[in-house]
Image (cartoon, helix red, strand yellow):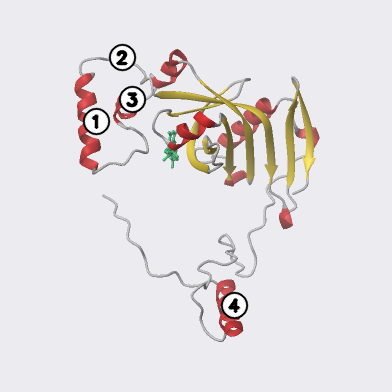
Amino acid sequence: MMKVRATDAAKPTAAEAKEQQAQSSSSGGPISTLKKIFAPTGGSTDPGRAIQYGKGTLDVTDLDPSPTEQFHKWFQEAIDAKVYQPETVTLSTASLPDGKVSARIVFMKELDDRGFVVYSNWETSNKSRDIESNPQAALTFWWHELERQVRVEGHVERLSAAESQVYYNTRIRGSRIGAWASPQSQVLNSREALEQKVKDVEKRFEGQEEIPVPPFWGGLRILPEMVEFWQGRQSRLHDRFRYTKVGEEWKIDRLSP
Ligand SMILES: Cc1cc2nc3c(=O)[nH]c(=O)nc-3n(C[C@H](O)[C@H](O)[C@H](O)COP(=O)(O)O)c2cc1C
């Protein structure tokens, strides 16, 4: 079993060392607010310079009039470029009236002309609390191998139990059981407590091939109102195109990086 251990403080990079020197000389000695990380270069072999993006370009003539078609095209290119799990996406939500924002990584599991679908717990998770008071969300994909980002913003709607059941049935039995057993994001007293819940659910569905999708679990569709396609370029002068929904049409604008 993997155990994670905190390591000793990492050796400062050249830029960090310079910054630390500047901070101590200007204050007359080391100060408690020394930056732990400063201007990391993203693994560049040139210690003074950040990695530059230059794998591609994006022009309005490359774009499909429909953002979901354009996304589909880029998703296929991500698969072809062997991007690791291109369906991995940050889902951001916010609760009202306090306006607190929360974000987490999920998997996008479906795309159609209506929008992007993710699956989760809609009773106990933080995202469910947010969506209840504010049915809007943002998705952020980052495909490092292609130096591409896609951002999606829009209203959300829950999928019906029948629709969710279709995807749920594709999951391995352990994951189907797990969805029933885990009141997601609630405090657990121990790992054993979780494993006991799993055993209880296994017993409940023993000998039963088909398991019904839990009523508190299922799909959430993000209906896009804004979709942005971002291609990294040199000197941070990236290509960005934003689709905005105007009635039933999509308006496309190039944005300043
Ligand atoms: C790569 C990856 C994929 C994940 N996929 C999902 C997912 O599809 N659905 C989900 O509910 N949680 C997924 N999680 C877990 C979430 O990040 C998060 O821990 C969980 O949804 C609870 O978040 P919340 O309480 O903020 O809603 C994934 C985490 C990682 C790192």
Return the residue nearer the eye: 11 or 153: 153
Helix, strand or loop for disc 2: loop
Q: Which residue is mark 3?
A: 176
Q: Which residue is mark 4?
A: 18
Q: Which quarter is ligand 1 in?
A: top left
Across and down, in percent, residue 249 comes to 76, 22
Q: Looking at the image, tell me whether mark 4 or mark 1 is earlier in sequence order.
A: 4
Q: Position of residue 50 (x, y in %)?
A: 64, 62
Residue 17 shown left or right of residue 208 in the figure: right
Q: Amino acid at mark 2?
A: Glu
Q: Secondary structure at mark 4?
A: helix
Label 1 to label 3: alpha-carbon separation:
10 Å
Q: Is mark 4 within 8 Å of ligand 1?
A: no
Mark closest to the chain's N terminus, 2 or 1: 1
Q: Quadrant of residue 197?
A: top left
Above/below status of 89 relative to 20 = above
Task: Name the residue type under label 1.
Answer: Val
Q: CA distance from mark 4 to mark 1?
A: 53 Å
Q: Residue at x 69, y 51 (%)?
A: 54
Q: Amino acid at mark 3?
A: Arg
